[in-house]
Image (cartoon, rainbow, N blue to C red):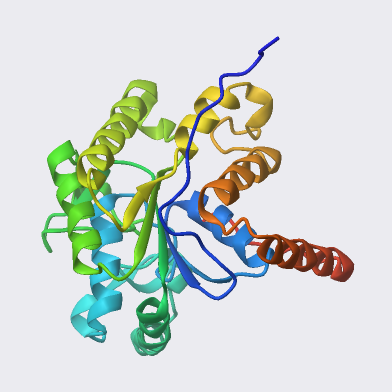
Amino acid sequence: MILQTRVESGTAGRLISGYDGTMTLGSCFSDEIGRRLSETGFKVLCNPFGTLYNPASIAKSVELLAGGKHFTEGDIVRTPDGFASFFHHSRFNRPTADEFLDNANRCLERDSESFAKAGFVLVTYGTAWVFRHKERNMIVSNCHKLPAAEFERSRLDVEQCAALTERMVSDFPGKTWIFTVSPIRHLADGAHGNRLSKATLLLALDKALDGKKNAFYFPAYEIMDDELRDYRFYEENMTHPTGQAADYIFERFADFAIDPSPECRERMAEALKELKRTGHRQNAGRD
């Protein structure tokens, strides 16, 4: 008796081993996967600018990491919680402009080096909806609790999302790119708006990755939607997958993207044993 629709994922064209550096970019689901990679012994840098949701902000973060150009006073915005930039998550906020710039630029230097060395980049798109700051005419990664009147909300279309994706992949052909669409539901957009957004991202990735030799799609969204469709796999907010669901999706991701050799899998198992022995699990957090 078959009681579940199995989502076939295949395998990526190049597999992560214990010797590859990996960077994750995107929604908090990329933190979930990144944390589990780290817990199983892989070298991972998760979300160097903090949580990002839309393709435009993610593509901009790649540009910043590759360019290595320092942030300046012109990038700073004053928020109710301190000084920040529209490129960063609120966890980068600092009490003074100088403190923000010092921290942001130190992190950029360190993370640019990690990006240059990373053989794999895992990108998770969360939504096609974006906020554009009217005065600066830029899509922001975070509105930082500033007045809604300062922003214009719109949805990127399939062509825009595809172009942003293709540029990342083509600009860095030496890296292996793995793209996913986050299974987390963005119900602030409404149920219909969330579906339209996810459909836009799915169509864009299908278009952008067609024929690419160094980029692959992992169906995290489809696994959650088809295999784990019961509400018991969602947290109380009914939008985020439970830890059990995220663990299951990571197991599927491991089959898709991680070296299946006994040596690699034994190393992963030993890392998890060590984690249990210390009684500590890393906390990626949800921002």
Quadrant of the rendered image containing residue 238: top right
Q: Residue at x 41, y 71 (%)?
A: 119
**Observer-nearest of 223 and 70:** 223
Q: Is residue 54 left or right of residue 171?
A: right
Quadrant of the rendered image containing residue 276: bottom right
| Quadrant of the rendering where the N terminus is positioned | top right
Q: How many marks?
A: 0
Residue at the outermost top position: 1
Q: Position of residue 84 (x, y in %)?
A: 35, 72
**Observer-nearest of 255 and 62:** 255
**Observer-nearest of 278 and 17:** 17
In this rendering, the answer to whether 22 lies above or below 148 is below
In this rendering, the answer to whether 168 lies above or below 206 is below
Q: Residue at x 53, y 57 (%)?
A: 31
Q: Residue at x 68, y 44 (%)?
A: 243
Q: Residue at x 37, y 62 (%)?
A: 176
In this rendering, the answer to whether 185 lies above or below 131 is above
Residue at the outermost right position: 277
Question: Would residue 86 be visible to someone looking at this image?
Answer: no
Q: Position of residue 128 (x, y in %)?
A: 27, 41
Q: Is residue 117 left or right of residue 132?
A: right
Question: Would residue 129 be visible to someone looking at this image?
Answer: yes
Q: Position of residue 66 (x, y in %)?
A: 26, 78
In this rendering, the answer to whether 131 lies above or below 220 is below
Q: Position of residue 12 (x, y in %)?
A: 44, 51
